[in-house]
Amino acid sequence: MNTNLKEDQIAYQETARNFALREMGPYASSWDEDSLFPVETLRKAAALGFAGIYTRSEFGGSGLGRLEASLIFEELATACPSTAAYLSVHNMVSWMIDTFGNSDQCTKWLPRLMTMEHLSSYCLTEPSSGSDAASLKTKAVREGDYYILNGEKAFISGGSVSDLYLCMVRTGEEGPKGISALVVEKGTPGLSFGKKEKKMGWNSQPTTTVVFQDCRVPVSHRIGGEGEGFTIAMKGLDGGRINIASCSLGGARACLEKAIAYMKERKQFGKKLAEFEALQFRLADMVTDLEAARLMVHNAANKLDTNDHDATIACAMAKRFATDVGFRICNEALQLHGGYGYLKDFQIERYVRDLRVHQILEGTNEIMRLIISRDLLK
């Protein structure tokens, strides 16, 4: 893998960095504190091409690769991991429609997704099926040109606010082969939402349950064929895992930089914290782990772009390692700040809260280990 970035990749990285500094950083704490969903900021990001980073340019996407997406998400997450993560979900849905949808579906939905005039959500998890996603219960029974949906999705980012919900539903037998993918539009009769969840972090995006009660969805809204939904969902998650790992890199980098600056200023026992060898070693370990995680994420992104045979395993490895490392670095940075790290004014605690969930979503890190070990033992 060539680790040297090309000029255009550096340009995308710098564009995202400047956007994060100007449009996200000054407001991220208030978004978190007041649970504000910054839709207008997201639309400004879309104007830069960040709503469809690896969606085809034919429909308004940027047509870039997964490495470019990783670079962009890392930069955005240095300011607000929560908002960057919602943008990751939106990109995942857009890509799934672009890749597996037909021309009519792409023409109908993608242009407004690319501007974020329409927002999107990914609906796989249910109250009784988290890690065991293939056991989902939401039922879609075909009646003529419609599917009648009944069931419930849980922990849905953008729930109640998004305009499109890409849902995995059961149209056939038990197990993964009986699952299909349907786009449900907001306002469809029978579609409703639960209360807005109160969360530890990720407060700049709403999270709700999504409920279907005799919800009539046109068959023309099915993405791919019947029984192909689980495969589509898993392919979407490969990229989602790279994205969320990249968000962990960004959050960790921001905390590391804050810790370095603090240690150069804070004095105890007559000298700056930066002069204590034990603390220097901790910083050395933090930056080494961060660099190793970044290399793993970029390697996985390259493998996904080239359709490498072990891309899924590389994505699982990168997601497991980067999200564990990212959270640990943020937590270490908080510790290095002492009591000040626990105060919201210093912002470290926000990154700790936001990055904790990265070890759970897009497949828990326990499931990542399962994916990796099964491949080793097959």
Image (cartoon, rainbow, N blue to C red):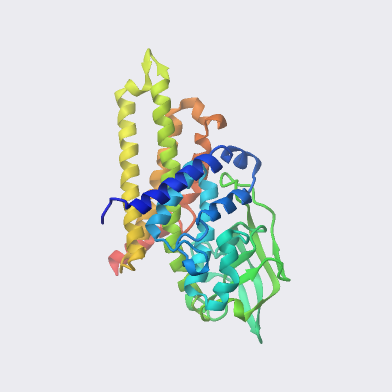
Direction from residue 40 to residue 258 in the image, left or right? left
* Residue 281 horizontal side relative to residue 251, left or right: left
User: Where residue 68 sits in the image (x, y, percent)?
Assistant: 40, 55
User: How many numbered marks, from 0 up?
Assistant: 0
Q: Residue furthest left?
A: 1
Q: Nearer the viewer, residue 162 or 180?
A: 162
Where residue 53 sits: x, y (%)? 47, 59
Asked if 240 appears above or below 222 in the picture, the reply is above
Image location (x, y in percent) of residue 174: 52, 77
Q: Which residue is drawn at the image coordinates 39% and 53% (left, top)?
A: 320
From the image, which quarter does the N terminus lie in?
bottom left
Q: Quadrant of residue 194?
A: bottom right
Q: Residue at x 36, y 59 (%)?
A: 301
* Quarter assignment of residue 313: bottom left
- Asked if one can make out residue 241 in the rendered structure from this viewpoint, the answer is yes
* Residue 141, horizontal then vertical, whole percent: 63, 81
Q: Nearer the viewer, residue 73 or 271?
A: 73
Furthest-top residue in this view: 270
Q: Residue at x 61, y 75 (%)?
A: 139
The C terminus sits in image quarter: bottom left
Q: Which residue occupies the extreme bottom position in the image?
A: 144
Answer yes or no: is residue 323 visible: no
- Name which residue lies at 59% across and 62% down: 120
Judged left or right of residue 11, residue 188 is right
